[in-house]
Amino acid sequence: MAARVKRLLFAAYAMAEVYFIWAAMLCFVLGIVLAEALQSGLPEVWLWPLVGLTGLFGLAALLRNRPVWLLPLFLLLGLVWSGLAQERLNSFAVPPGEALFVQGCVVEVLSHEQNVFAQLAETPRRGCSFIMQAEEQNGWRGRLLIVSSPVTPRVGDRLRVCGLVNQLPERYNFALDSSRYFYSQSLGAAVRPVPQGISLLRPAAVYAPQSLGQDMRERVFQSMAILPSEQQALLRGIGFGDTSMLTNGQSGVLAQTGIMHVFAVSGLHIGYVVLLGGWLLAILRVPRWLHFVGTALLVIFFALVVGPTASVLRATVMTLVGGLGTILANGRAEGRHSVCSLVLAAFLLLLWRSNWALQPGFLLSFAATAGIVCTAEYWRQLVPSTILSIGLAAQFMIMPILAYFFNTISLVGLLLSPFLACAAGLVVILLLLAMPLSFCGLAYVPLAGAGWLAEMMYKLAALLAGLPGAFVYTLRPGWSAIIIYYALLLAALYCLAQVKKSNRAELKPY
C-alpha cells in the first residue's frame, strides 16, 4: 500500500514538473506584480468574460497542442485576481469616526504599536493591538486592525467588538502612503474599541496550533526576562522578528551594516531549524520518509511560534515542497527543485494574499532566495569561499530593493552579512533548544549563550558602521533605474557563465 501511494505521489510530482505548469504559475505571479506596481486592477465585471475566454483558448490550445497560448491569459488572470483583492478591501464603507459593530476571530496579536499603528493609538505602547478576521454588521468581511485594546486576546478567540473607525494618518511607511500600507497588510480599517466594547464569544481551543505557538513564544519571552535589556531586544529580533525593543540607534546600525534581514525571520532561520531537526533525527536513524515528516512538523511549529509573515510562509512552503521533491526523486536533490519550489511558494502566497506582491519583506525574501538559488554558482567564479559567494548573490539581488524602501546601501554589509548570518543561525538553534527547556526551568542556559552571542554581533556591526564609507544614503530609484540595474546584473552573470563554460571546456580531456 505504501509503495502504491509513493508511486502515485511520484507520478503527480513528475506531472507537476512539466514546463507549462511552472511557466503558467510564473505568469500569474508576474500579472499580480504588474497590477500592484500600477496600483490598479481590472474591474470585477471582467472576471467571468476572462474566465470564458481562458476556457476557449484552453480548448483551442488542447486541439492544436499549443499550451503556450495560455500563458498571456494567466498573466491577465493575475491582473484580475489583484484587482478583485483591491475591490474587496475598498468595499469597506464605514467612514472614519463612525461606530462599527463586528464579530470575528483573532488571527494575530501584535506585541507593540508599530509604524502607522503608533499614530492610531491615543496612548502608544499601552493596551494591545491585534488583527481579526471579522464580519461587519452590513455584511462586509475582511481583516481589521484593533488598536488600544484594554484586553489581550489569544489567537483563535472569537470576539464581538464595538468601536470607532480611525482616520488614517498622513504618513509614509516604506515608501507607501497609509492607505497603500493598510492594503499591503490586507487591512480594511483600524478600529479603536469603546470602553467595555470587547466581549468574548468563544475562547480559543486549548490545543489549537496557533495558541500553542503563541504560548511558546510568550514562555520564551518570560524566560529571557532576566537577561540585560539589550540582549532581550536582540534575541527577540533575531529569533522571532520582533523589533519592538530595539532603539532607533540600534535599528540605524543594523540598517547601515546591511544585516537588518537577520531580524526578519526568513529562509535563514528555517534553514537552521531544518539543520537542527535533521541532526536530531539522524541520531535516531529513522527512515527517510519519517525524517521528512519530523522535519516538516518542526518547521511548521516554528512558523506558528514566530507568526505567519510572508518570509516565514515562503520559506516554509519552499522547505516542504523541496523536501517532498527530494523524497519522491529518491534522494536526488536536483537544482530545479529549488527553483520550482520558489515559483510554487510565490504562486501560493500571492494566490492567498495578492497584496503581498510589493511588500518589502516579501520582495526581500524572494529576491534574496532567488539570488542564492540561481546566481550563487556564478559568483563562486570570483570568490573562492562558498559563504562569500552566497552573501554576494543575495546582497546584489536585493540592493535596489533596499535603496527603494530604505534609501540605504550598505557596502560593509557585502562582507559582514554572510558571517553574521552564520552567527545568527547559532542564536536560532540556541533559542530552539530553550523552548523545551523552558518547561523545566533550564531555558536560561541556552538563552544566556544566545544573548551573549547576539550582543557580540551587534557590537561588531556598530564598530564597522562607524568606518568611513561603510554605507551610503541614496534617493529612491525609479523603475527605469531598477530595470537597468537588473539588466546589467544579468549581463554580468551571463559573462560569468560563459567564463565557467570555457573553463569546463579547457579541462575536458580530448
Image (cartoon, rainbow, N blue to C red):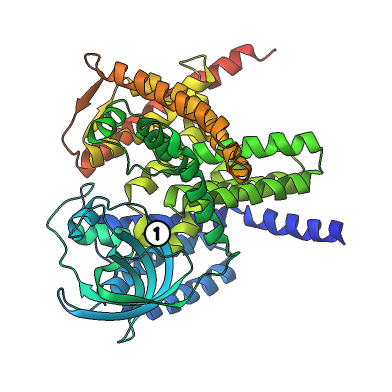
Residue 123 x %, y % = 20, 57
For label 1, the crowd category at 10 Å Cα-Cα, with few meaning under 14, some 14 to 19 and many 20 or more, is some
Along the line of sight, which residue is nearer the eye, 417 or 330? 417
Question: Would residue 244 be visible to someone looking at this image?
Answer: yes
Viewer-closest of 21 and 149: 149
Q: Position of residue 82 (x, y in %)?
A: 35, 65
Residue at the far bottom in the pictured view: 138
Count of numbered labels shown in the rendering: 1
Question: Which residue carries the number 1 mark?
Answer: 109
The residue sitting at 21% across, 62% down in the picture is: 179
Note whether residue 333 is visible: no
Residue drawn at x 82%, y 44% is 287
The location of residue 43, given as percent across then percent down, is 28, 75
Q: Identify the residue at image location x=31%, y=25%.
A: 257
Q: Give the x, y percent position of residue 428.
A: 52, 35
Q: Secondary structure at mark 1?
A: strand
Left or right of residue 439, residue 311 in this image: left
Question: Is 182 left, or right, of 308 in this rendering?
Answer: left
Q: Quadrant of the N terminus?
A: bottom right
- Quadrant including the C terminus: top right
The answer to which image quadrant residue 117 occupies is bottom left
Residue located at (18% from left, 31% from top): 474
Nearest the eye: 444 or 373: 444
Q: Nearer the viewer, residue 360 or 236?
A: 236
